[in-house]
Image (cartoon, rainbow, N blue to C red):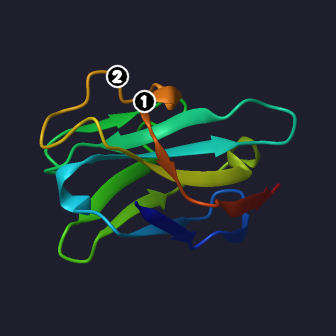
Amino acid sequence: QVQLVESGGGLVQAGGSLRLSCAASGRTFSRYTMGWFRQAPGKEREFVAAISWSGAGTYYADSVKGRFTISRDNAKNTVYLQMNSLKPEDAAVYYCALDSSTLMRPPVAPERLRGYDYWGQGTQVTVSS
């Protein structure tokens, strides 16, 4: 079993920054691809970013490229999402997720929601205009 706990959400003005964290426990976190997804009210959950087990590979949705940065600290069992230049359309509940099929391998389709089998409870990000 894996437990994922997100933190760092909150209210920020447009143009501001937030850093989300996702702490993992219960499995060897460092061996798996981790992803961030988000879901706004009335919309489907969508891919934001992912990072391979080693950190060598990072993947981003076009909507966040150049503004968001995903990273991980395997010694701390934590993955981060640095969000800069936030826009009102970035407001959503942000979820981290783990893909247990990617044991020490790069992800084939990191943007695919169904590839992730462990999810956190989410953290709310609100962006005021």
**Quadrant housing residue 24:** bottom left
Taking the image as drawn, is residue 13 in sight?
yes
Which circle's residue, 2 or 1, is located before the other in the chain? 2
Label 1 Cα neighbours within 10 Å, binned few <14 / some 14-19 / many ≥20: some
| x, y percent for residue 114 | 50, 28
Question: Where does the N terminus fall, quadrant-wise?
Answer: bottom left
Say which mark, if any, is on residue 91: none
Residue at disc 2, secondary structure: loop
Say what secondary structure mark 1 lies in. helix
Residue at point 22%, 43% (across, down): 52
Q: Residue at x 56, y 73 (%)?
A: 7
As drawn, which residue projects farthest toward the right? Answer: 42
Q: Vertical placement of 11 versus 92: above or below?
A: below
> For this rendering, which residue is in front, 12 or 2?
2
The label shown at residue 109 is 2
Relative placement, left or right, of 114 versus 16 is left
Residue 16 versus residue 53 in the image, above or below: below
Residue shown at the point (30%, 57%) measured from the top left: 71
In this figure, which residue is indicated by the disc labeled 1? Answer: 115
Along the horizontal axis of the image, is 92 left or right of 42? left
Badges 2 and 1: C-beta atoms under 8 Å apart?
Answer: yes
The residue at the point 55 percent across, 43 percent down is 37
